[in-house]
Image (spheres, rainbow, N blue to C red):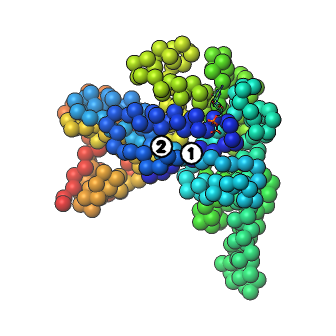
Amino acid sequence: AVSAGIVGLPNVGKSTLFNALTQAGAAAENFPFCTIDPNVGVVPVPDPRLDVLAEMFRSREKIPATVRFVDIAGLVAGASKGEGLGNRFLAHIREVEAIVHVVRAFEDPGVVHVAGRVDPARDIEIVNTELLLADLETVERRLERVGKRARVGEEAAHKEAACLEELAAHLGEGRPARMWKPEECADLLAELHLLTAKPVLYVANVSEAMLAENPEDHPLVRAVRARADEEGAEVVVLSAALEAELQSLPPEERREFLQAYGLPAPGLDRLIAAAYRLLRQITFFTAGEKEARAWTIREGTKAPQAGGVIHSDFERGFIRAEVVAYADLVRAGSMEEARRKGLVRLEGRDYVVQDGDVILFRFHV
Ligand code: GDP
């Protein structure tokens, strides 16, 4: 499964947020997974479409899609030089597919800031610089090796060295690898597994008091937003402490708690949905009396491979898929009606599954 890693400076609210996420996971009904590792949380993706389908099919069970969050603690300035737990920290980031960068945007004299005072732009810079330096080292090491081969006249090595030099210059200007996109170097870039090539979103962790006003107008949130805009990244504004408190309440008390803060829904829901998009995951559904279930695939997955996520027989023995778009099914009101209206399509091996497809797989064993 794909994972998003939670990173940020110490004392910004990472573990508070991670705990809220894992509580949300642990509380999910019919939860098909268990905790594998104390730093890994498997969290259900809130999706009202699943509730609608479960009702329509009178399903006995409802199984949501999930996303994995990994709590990656231990970043300090100097991590790329191996300070503190620096190296281990960087190794953990290498293993995730996307980065959730938590930034402190709450003032609280009771919580010490590692760099003395709350300054989101500087904090983001500290974290990103460590990642950039680590990448620069990766690129330079590779360049050393390739450079030797290029000098003895190897054509491919020559091309690669040119790419690496350009990339090193780009990183050297303080710009992440995800913003570097020359086509002729795309394969190389994928191979390097650079930290700053991973997609990122920022969490502005605000205080409970800030939530009650308009947090978007707060200078600390604006500072996060300005920095994120530079690289076209999303920002999720929430209060980690409040989210943790919310998750610790019995479900029937949560609505009232949210209302007291004037919040339409938990901030975690927005974060989970944003992380899911960031990981380029989409959802298709299967539904029947036994269960309504949301399945996760990567954008661009074809029907047989989507079936393979459910069971290897579905992929191996794939015949065809009966597909109806969620919106069409809801408009028709039932599967029978959707069929009558010709909204249920028969799709073959080359069909690229779309977000929201409700699918019945036909296969032989
Ligand atoms: P980490 O080092 O980034 O994992 O940070 P923690 O989650 O341990 O949080 C550090 C301190 O900040 C703790 O005392 C938290 O209670 C506090 N904290 C975290 N989130 C919030 C928040 O949203 N509001 C306030 N007021 N305090 C928070």
- Whether residue 228 can be seen here: yes
The residue located at (55%, 56%) in the rendering is 95
The residue located at (39%, 41%) in the rendering is 65
Q: In the structure shown, which secondary structural element does the residue marked by tag 2 occupy?
A: strand
Q: Which residue matches tag 1? A: 71
Q: Which residue matches tag 2? A: 41
Residue 98: x and y in percent read: 57, 49
Q: Earlier in the sequence, mark 1 or mark 2?
A: 2
Q: Answer yes or no: do the residues labelled 1 and 2 have beta carbons within 8 Å?
A: yes
The residue located at (54%, 13%) in the rendering is 260
Count of numbered circles in the view: 2
Q: Amino acid at mark 1?
A: Asp
| Observer-nearest of 68 and 157 | 68
| Observer-nearest of 79 and 308 | 79
Q: From the viewer's perspective, tell me whether residue 233 is left or right of residue 273.
A: right
Quarter of the image for the C terminus: give it: bottom left
Residue 233: x and y in percent read: 64, 41
